[in-house]
Image: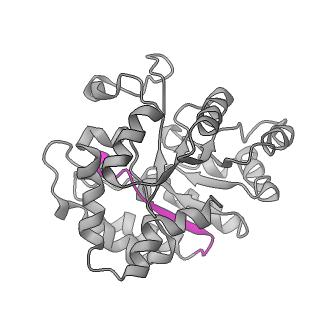
Amino acid sequence: MVIDSHQHFWKYDPVRHDWINDEMSILKKDFLPADLGQVYKIAGVDGCVAVQADQSEAETDFLLELAEQHEFILGVVGWVDLRSPDLAERLLHYSDYPKLKGFRHVVQSEPDPNFMLRDDFQKGIAQLHAHNYTYDILIFPNQLPAAIETVKNFPDQKFVVDHIAKPYIKAGKIEQWAKDIESIASFSNVMCKLSGMVTEADWENWKKADFVPYLEVVNQCFTAERLLFGSDWPVCLLGGAYLAIKDILADYLKDFSDADQAAIWGENAMHFYQL
């Protein structure tokens, strides 16, 4: 079974999606389940986890509504204000939605590299475990130290690093990122998504070999037991068609054992998100 552990839907709005700049004009349109369903039929993908792109509860509700309408959307990672004094009430409200598996905050957009260590944010993270919610870590490499401290603070919380923490693939930088990946992977409550890599590479001229050093690091640190396939569709389209993006990972995994491939392609996502 192949599970895409990381993709997005949206009805394009230039204000709400102001992060989509002119270089990303291919993304300035609606991306909905009807579009992705056709892609999955061609790519041999059985289901997915829809992840928030807009920081609002309206986004969470939008994704949950789509998940109810389309069986292949097996889970949702939504957004809720983890810093809100009303967080306990909001988590209780969302506990009635079985397809809601966890939450994410777009930490990569926060200017403070230590944003995750803010007292109010830490108090929010602390409330997720009681509802068995996961937390997706979306960061840039300079924010890894704060993420490391956060996962250390909450050993019972299930975390997953999105997009292998967005290393500087285009520039070929790896050393400090690799050290920090080794550190965060030392905590057994953390997994890692093999997703979003192409957007950190040269969109027009990337080669499969560009990703191998980074894939080697996360494979050595997390091992196949804690890695998940994710496409980051439709953002991945900046670097090419879905099949081309999926083939980066397929080529890397071709010599892995059948068991390890099955784990990375789908079983780990099923287990982590309880799909």
Residue 219 location, x and y as percent? 39, 74
Q: Which residues are magenta?
A: 187-199
Residue 173 seen from this side = no
Residue 137 location, x and y as percent? 55, 53
Residue 162 seen from this side = yes
Task: Give 133 or 47, whichever is nearer the viewer.
Answer: 47
In the rendered image of this protein, does residue 155 appear above or below residue 81? below
Answer left or right for 239 relative to 148.
left
Task: Give 239 or 126, whichever is nearer the viewer.
Answer: 239
Q: Residue at x 37, y 22 (%)?
A: 29
How are the colours assigned in the image? one colour
- Tally of numbered tags: 0
User: Is residue 119 a member of the stretch shown in magenta?
Assistant: no
Q: Residue at x 52, y 35 (%)?
A: 53
In the rendered image of this protein, does residue 136 appear above or below residue 159? above
Q: Residue at x 40, y 70 (%)?
A: 218
Answer left or right for 15 relative to 252.
right
Answer left or right for 157 relative to 275.
right
Answer left or right for 222 relative to 274.
left
Residue 21 location, x and y as percent? 33, 25
Task: Report which quarter residue 250 is drawn in.
Answer: bottom left
Task: Give 149 or 199, whichever is nearer the viewer.
Answer: 199
Task: Give 46 or 219, whichever is nearer the viewer.
Answer: 46
**Rendered-image quadrant of the C terminus:** bottom right
Residue 60 location, x and y as percent? 64, 34
Q: Residue at x 65, y 52 (%)?
A: 117
Extreme residue in the left direction: 205
Task: Report which quarter residue 261 is drawn in.
Answer: bottom left
